[in-house]
Image (spheres, rainbow, N blue to C red):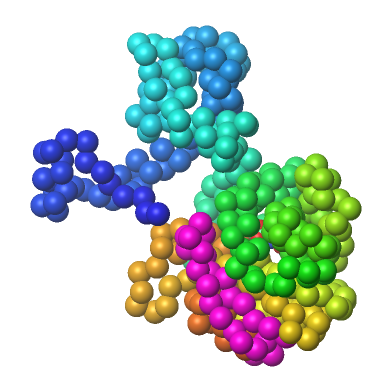
Amino acid sequence: MRLTLRPDTPAEALGLAAGLVPEPIFDSYVALMQARTLMVASRIGVFDALAEAPGTADDLAVRLGVTAEGLAVVLPALHALGYLTADGRQYSLSRKARRTLTVRGRQALGDWMAFTHDMWDAFDGLEDVLRGGRIQNIHGFTEDDPYWDRYMRGLLQISKISAADVARAIGAPRNARALLDVAGGHGGYSMALCRRHRRLRATIIELEGAARIGHKIVEEEGFSGRIQHVTRDMHTAYLGAGYDIALAANIIHHLDRGAAVALLTRMRGALVPGGRLAVFEQERPADGEAGTQIGTLTGVLFHVTSGARTCTAGELTGMLVDAGLRDVQVKRLRRAPGQVLVLGRA
Ligand SMILES: C[S@@+](CC[C@H](N)C(=O)[O-])C[C@H]1O[C@@H](n2cnc3c(N)ncnc32)[C@H](O)[C@@H]1O
């Protein structure tokens, strides 16, 4: 998927084809207004309120406790963006808003939207980081900070898009019994693997703040009997032994190469002979390749938030080989654009 300009009129189509459109205005100015309007509309509850009943700016303002003047400018913008439909002054949800931005939506992303505010704040530091300034440590919050709830529940929602595919692509035997999920946080991937492997039990190694929320989530989802969170630092903790599967999803991009290979080596050591190790990551394009928007831009985000960066499939393959894994292979999944799954055997 790619964000791209789509003309509203035939004249604009001609202008676009002729190279006359000032594209950076849309890619920066329009994109930032769009992002912030959508983020705030979601946070103040516009979409869930409209899921209950269509409304005008005036009556929604009363229901949400915001100004009618403000909503009178926000609602037409959401209409233009395709998230609302309008009948005179009365607004309703479009199908995509109902599916993605309401609590009961089939692909609900409200928690993810709440977390985008944290990423917005983090991205504010990009120039400073590029000039050698302070890296923002997104894992440095105290364990009871409400940040962990937004972080874990946001990531859980996006993990649901691809977790079942990841679980299938790992290709472990159906009777696998033990999973080590390093930095598994919310437990989305552990739960998907437990759904696939009936006898599987998972151990998630996590920081305290993430483990507290992750434990609550697996309890809410009915998996607390099969998934345990162990509060330890993955760099130093004894990881255990006898696992059939070891997973590191979206953590390698926070580490430098030395730390990543050291972690993968210890994960390999925790597996039974022939056990599977899986790394699931945003993908950095190889030199000279264009890459995906989402894969490369999350690379920028992770640099701001941890000082490390995403890796190419070749770099990840090299890490698994150096960590002593055999039969290393790379897979890309249909529902995980910009991401890559790298697998090896102990
Ligand atoms: C981007 S999240 C990935 C969560 C999950 N695996 C996923 O793919 O959605 C990174 C996770 O790494 C955890 N983490 C960071 N440093 C850690 C450490 N030293 N030990 C254990 N977990 C750590 C964070 O708490 C966070 O939950």
Q: Magenta stretch? A: 322-346
Is residue 339 depicted above or below 335 in this figure? below
Position of 325 compared to 289: left or right?
right
Q: Residue 37: give x, y in percent of width and height.
A: 46, 33
Is residue 218 depicted above or below 133 in this figure? above
Query: What residue is drawn where x is 74% and y is 84%?
Result: 274
Position of 219 compared to 295: left or right?
right
- Magenta segment includes 344: yes
Q: Quadrant of the N terminus?
A: bottom left
The one of 339 and 30 positioned closer to us in this rendering: 339
The one of 158 and 192 positioned closer to us in this rendering: 192
Query: What residue is drawn where x is 54% and y is 26%?
Result: 47
The one of 327 and 131 positioned closer to us in this rendering: 327
Q: Residue 261: give x, y in percent of width and height.
A: 68, 83
Q: Quadrant of the C terminus?
A: bottom right
Q: Residue 313: give x, y in percent of width and height.
A: 51, 77
- Quarter of the image where one finds residue 133: bottom right
Query: What residue is drawn where x is 70% and y is 72%?
Result: 172
Query: What residue is drawn where x is 65% and y is 71%?
Result: 171
**Residue 141 makes an appearance in the image:** no
Position of 37 compared to 82: left or right?
right
Instruction: Report the image quarter containing ligand 1.
Output: bottom right
- Quarter of the image where one finds residue 303: bottom right
Q: Residue 32: give x, y in percent of width and height.
A: 41, 43
